[in-house]
Image (cartoon, helix red, strand yellow):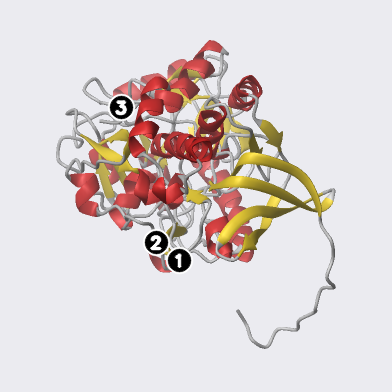
């Protein structure tokens, strides 16, 4: 912080307590939504706070529709609420087969309705349009949060709190130790977009005529480490149109980071989940940085669409359909947890007695791509969600404790859902048993996980 900034002193004020609950979840991405549903299904009262006007996080507000794009015939998964997201989306007409795996791509707009339905069915108290701004502390115990909204400043009290903000916002402001990846080493942010006006038969004919593989990811700016088995596998990768656009002067040469994957092409002419814009240097905890890169990302997306129009079969009449509601952030703060996952854990099938779910050997980030095609998997430990120095708090989603390569695994949405379901159950059962979160009987948590359909061993 600039020490030369002007400062003002706010007057003291009373804040109305607008809601009291057993379990309070902040953030409704796959981790937070799974946590809220799991806790409610244990029979405790649950409130879910979300700063946007819909639930779903990356699935809805960012537009990341490939929830389980790692899935292949030999993949072993936890199932549970994460798989339920896919199944309910399919049942509600909000999913189509994913282009590079055995999973379903979840429609970012349709999943807003899916999430609404799941929240309502579980009896979770929805609290949209509220931004977390401060913790309420009693010594080292977190007892609630302050939010801001159109209604002003409000307080929410809870017996247990789950931070699913993605950036460990609650934990950080409550005084729990966290660490933030240096900006120059953060995974790039992305502005997702979707297109319309694509000629599906012509586009797919072009894909069949020049099929791309994961080996093609290692072109231009990137070098991707694989285990070798991925190199010959099909990938819906787009790189050549943008290289040609640079050669022809359509895209500036400095923008050699444009390129990546598409998700699904629909009979209606929609080409969705365009993961092509990669913005290095964006700090997802800095609003000025996010403003700069959000604007830059939209600008680059339009350059990408122009290149696709010129150089990709079926795209001559393509146009922008929509952007995600906000920039997609992969990497900011993580807690220093009771146990921090390591690169060795995610690469070598780690096993833990306090497992709350399994996750397939899927690593995607920091120049590493390993797909779970051989049945290998790891345990997700409960202790990775326990922050230090703050009581009554669990942290779930991509901010759980771990090193760089561990984060490249646990940041993925399906793993966030696994961790979130474990966190929700643990929070609920700690209330029922009258035990602190670091003293709960993990076997009771695992029994409830099994009852809720989760594989944890």
Residue 253 in view, yes or no: no
Which mark identifies residue 77?
3
Q: Quadrant of residue 211?
A: top left
Task: Choose between 187 and 75: the one closer to the eye.
Answer: 75
Sequence order check, earlier mark of 3 and 1? 3
Disc 3 versus disc 1: nearer the observer: 1
Quick one: which residue is furthest to the front in this view? 434
Q: Quadrant of the N terminus?
A: bottom right
Q: Quadrant of the C terminus?
A: top left
Which mark identifies residue 336?
2
* Residues under numbered marks 2 and 1 in contact, where contact means CB atoms less than 8 Å apart: yes
125 to 366, vertically: above or below: above
| Cα distance in 3D space between marks 2 and 1 | 6 Å
Drawn side of residue 374 relative to residue 322, left or right: left
* Residues under numbered marks 3 and 2 in contact, where contact means CB atoms less than 8 Å apart: no
| Cα distance in 3D space between marks 3 and 2 | 26 Å
The residue carrying pointer 2 sits among few (fewer than 14), some (14 to 19) or many (20 or more) residues within 10 Å by Cα, namely many
Q: Which residue is mark 1?
A: 177
The residue carrying pointer 3 sits among few (fewer than 14), some (14 to 19) or many (20 or more) residues within 10 Å by Cα, namely many
Q: Quadrant of residue 361?
A: top left
Sequence order check, earlier mark of 2 and 1? 1
Sequence order check, earlier mark of 3 and 2? 3
Image location (x, y in percent) of residue 65 = 49, 31
> What residue appears at the point 65 percent right and 37 percent down from the top-left corner?
47
Image location (x, y in percent) of residue 100 = 34, 26
Disc 3 versus disc 2: nearer the observer: 2
Quick one: which residue is furthest to the top in this view? 91
């Amino acid at each position: 912080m600039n020490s030369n900034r002007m400062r003002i002193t706010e007057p003291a004020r009373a804040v109305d307590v607008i809601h009291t609950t057993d379990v309070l979840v902040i953030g409704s991405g796959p981790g937070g939504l799974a946590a809220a549903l799991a806790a409610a299904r244990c029979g405790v009262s649950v409130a879910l706070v979300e700063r946007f006007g819909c639930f779903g996080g990356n699935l809805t507000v960012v537009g990341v529709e490939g929830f389980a794009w790692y899935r292949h015939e030999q993949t072993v998964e936890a199932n549970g609420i994460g798989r339920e997201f896919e199944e309910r989306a399919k049942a509600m007409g909000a999913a189509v087969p994913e282009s590079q795996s055995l999973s379903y791509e979840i429609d970012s707009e349709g999943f807003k309705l899916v999430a609404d339905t799941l929240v309502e069915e579980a009896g979770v108290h929805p609290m949209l349009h509220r931004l977390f701004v401060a913790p309420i502390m009693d010594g080292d115990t977190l007892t609630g949060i302050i939010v801001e909204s159109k209604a002003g400043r409000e307080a929410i009290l809870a017996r247990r709190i789950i931070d699913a903000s993605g950036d460990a916002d609650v934990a950080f402001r409550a005084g729990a130790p966290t660490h933030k990846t240096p900006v120059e080493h953060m995974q790039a942010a992305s502005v997702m977009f979707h297109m319309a006006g694509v000629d599906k038969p012509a586009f797919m004919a072009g894909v069949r005529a020049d099929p791309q593989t994961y080996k093609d990811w290692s072109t231009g700016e990137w070098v991707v480490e694989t285990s070798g088995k991925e190199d010959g596998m099909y990938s819906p990768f787009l790189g050549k149109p943008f290289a040609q656009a640079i050669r022809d002067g359509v895209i500036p040469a400095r923008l050699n980071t444009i390129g990546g994957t598409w998700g699904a092409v629909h009979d209606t002419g929609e080409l969705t989940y365009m993961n092509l814009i990669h913005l290095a240097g964006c700090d997802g905890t800095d609003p000025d940085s996010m403003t700069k890169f959000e604007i830059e990302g939209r600008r680059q997306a339009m350059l990408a669409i122009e290149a696709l129009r010129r150089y990709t079969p079926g795209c001559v009449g393509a146009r922008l359909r929509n952007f995600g509601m906000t920039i997609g952030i992969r990497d900011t703060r993580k807690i220093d947890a009771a146990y921090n996952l390591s690169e060795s854990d995610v690469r070598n099938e780690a096993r833990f007695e306090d497992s709350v779910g399994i996750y397939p050997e899927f690593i995607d980030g920091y120049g590493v791509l390993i797909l779970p095609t051989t049945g290998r998997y790891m345990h997700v430990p409960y202790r990775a969600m326990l922050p230090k120095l703050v009581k009554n708090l669990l942290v779930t989603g991509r901010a759980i404790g771990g090193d760089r390569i561990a984060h490249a695994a646990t940041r993925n949405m399906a793993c966030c859902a696994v961790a979130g379901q474990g966190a929700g159950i643990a929070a609920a059962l700690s209330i029922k048993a009258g035990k602190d979160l670091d003293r709960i009987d993990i076997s009771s948590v695992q029994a409830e996980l099994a009852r809720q359909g989760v594989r944890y061993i």
